[in-house]
Image (cartoon, rainbow, N blue to C red):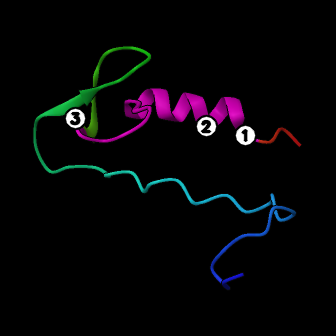
Amino acid sequence: MDETEQSPQDSSYYPAPAAPAGRVAGPPYADCVQCGKPTEYGVATPGVVLCPVCEWQDAQRTACSG
């Protein structure tokens, strides 16, 4: 077995997700999937994109409460 191959017993390895395209300097912007307002991300950004307000609210919901 090659060093780069994973054994069947090693099921804890998962490839890293693709890096988001990030914020863009100008239009076209993607629409927020929750409220529909323009986001800071380009339309080519993969995955769920949220506007700054919805990002903040989502972070508040998922933050550890203690």
Percent of width and height locating residue 28: 12, 34
Report helix, strand or loop for mark 3.
loop
Q: Amino acid at mark 1?
A: Ala
Q: Earlier in the sequence, mark 3 or mark 1?
A: 3
Q: Amino acid at mark 2?
A: Ala
Quarter of the image for residue 13 reads bottom right
Q: Give the spatial CA distance, label 2 vs label 1.
A: 6 Å
Quarter of the image for residue 61 reads top right
At label 3, counting other C-alpha atoms closer than 10 Å, the crowd grade (few under 14, some 14-19, many 20 or more) is: some
Residue displayed at 67% across by 58% down: 14
User: Where's the N terminus, which quadrant?
Assistant: bottom right
Please tell me whether residue 51 belongs to the stretch shown in magenta. Answer: yes
Q: Earlier in the sequence, mark 3 or mark 2?
A: 3
Residue displayed at 39% across by 51% down: 20
31 displayed left or right of 12: left
Residue ID for mark 3: 43
Segment tinted magenta in the rendering: 42-63
At label 2, counting other C-alpha atoms closer than 10 Å, the crowd grade (few under 14, some 14-19, many 20 or more) is: few
Label ID, residue 40: none
Q: How many callouts does the rendering have?
A: 3
- Outermost residue, left side: 27
Q: Give the spatial CA distance, label 3 vs label 2.
A: 22 Å
- CB within 8 Å, label 3 to label 1: no
Report helix, strand or loop for mark 2.
helix
User: Where's the C terminus, which quadrant?
Assistant: top right
Residue ID for mark 2: 59
Q: Nearer the viewer, mark 3 or mark 1?
A: 3
Residue 34 lies, with reference to residue 44, above or below; the image says above
Report helix, strand or loop for mark 1.
loop
Label ID, residue 63: 1
Percent of width and height locating residue 33: 40, 20
At label 1, counting other C-alpha atoms closer than 10 Å, the crowd grade (few under 14, some 14-19, many 20 or more) is: few
